[in-house]
Every structure is written in C-alpha cells, then in structure tokens.
Amino acid sequence: MLSADNKRQLWIPEGFAHGFYVLSESAEFVYKCTDYYNPQSEHSLLWNDKSVGIKWPLVDGLTPLLSAKDREGKTFINSAYFD
C-alpha cells in the first residue's frame, strides 16, 4: 500500500491501465508523466468491467465516488488498444 509514511512509489509504464481506490476520507495523489500532458491521448476503462475482474472492496456495496470521465469509461473489449 502506498502512503505518505512509507514514501513508496509505483511506476506504471506508458499504455498500461491503472486506477486508484482511496480507503480514507480524502487523499492527495501526486504523479509524474513521461511527457507533456495530452488529454486527447487519455482513455478510460470502465471501473467495474466484469471482464477485467477486479474485486473492489466496496463499502456496504455502494458505488464509489467517480469523476465524470471515469463514469463514462469503456469496457475492456471496447477500449482503444496500443501497439
């Protein structure tokens, strides 16, 4: 688990899907990119796509608070692929 206390980092290679699930009331997330930010290159994977099979630890089965972009994510089968 990443935390301010353990100062651990996680490298996510370019083109890899990634997501964050916050267990606390709030979180501050800082990240670096390999190049300038390009929103046209972003794609969102549907957070609860059954074909991906992530078992999110939902509190009382409630849907997590999602950004508008994340609510509009596509299923893996309908997502953009990169060579």
Image (cartoon, rainbow, N blue to C red):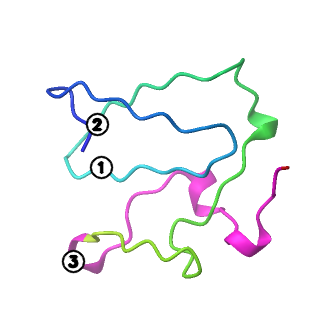
- Please state, as top left, top right, bottom left or bottom right, where the N terminus lies in the image: top left
| Three-letter amino acid code at the position of disc 2 | Ala
Callout 3: 10 Å neighbours few (<14), some, many (20+)? few
In the structure shown, which secondary structural element does the residue marked by tag 1 occupy?
loop
What is the magenta range? 59-82
Q: Which residue is drawn at 78% across and 71% down?
A: 78
Q: Do the residues labelled 3 and 1 touch (CB within 8 Å)?
A: no
* Magenta region includes residue 72: yes
Q: Is residue 16 above or below residue 79?
A: above
Residue 22's tag is 1
Q: Which residue is drawn at 31% across and 74% down?
A: 62
Q: Do the residues labelled 1 and 2 touch (CB within 8 Å)?
A: yes
From the viewer's perspective, tell me whether residue 53 is left or right of residue 42. Answer: left
From the viewer's perspective, tell me whether residue 14 is left or right of residue 27. Answer: right
In the structure shown, which secondary structural element does the residue marked by tag 3 occupy?
helix
Residue 27's tag is 2
Callout 1: 10 Å neighbours few (<14), some, many (20+)? few
Q: Name the residue under label 3.
A: 60
Residue placed most toward the observer, 29 or 8: 8
Q: Which of marks 3 and 2 is nearer the N terminus?
A: 2
Q: How far apart are marks 3 and 1 (CA)?
A: 15 Å
| Three-letter amino acid code at the position of disc 3 | Asp
| Residue sitting farthest toward the left | 5
Q: Residue at x 29, y 71 (%)?
A: 58
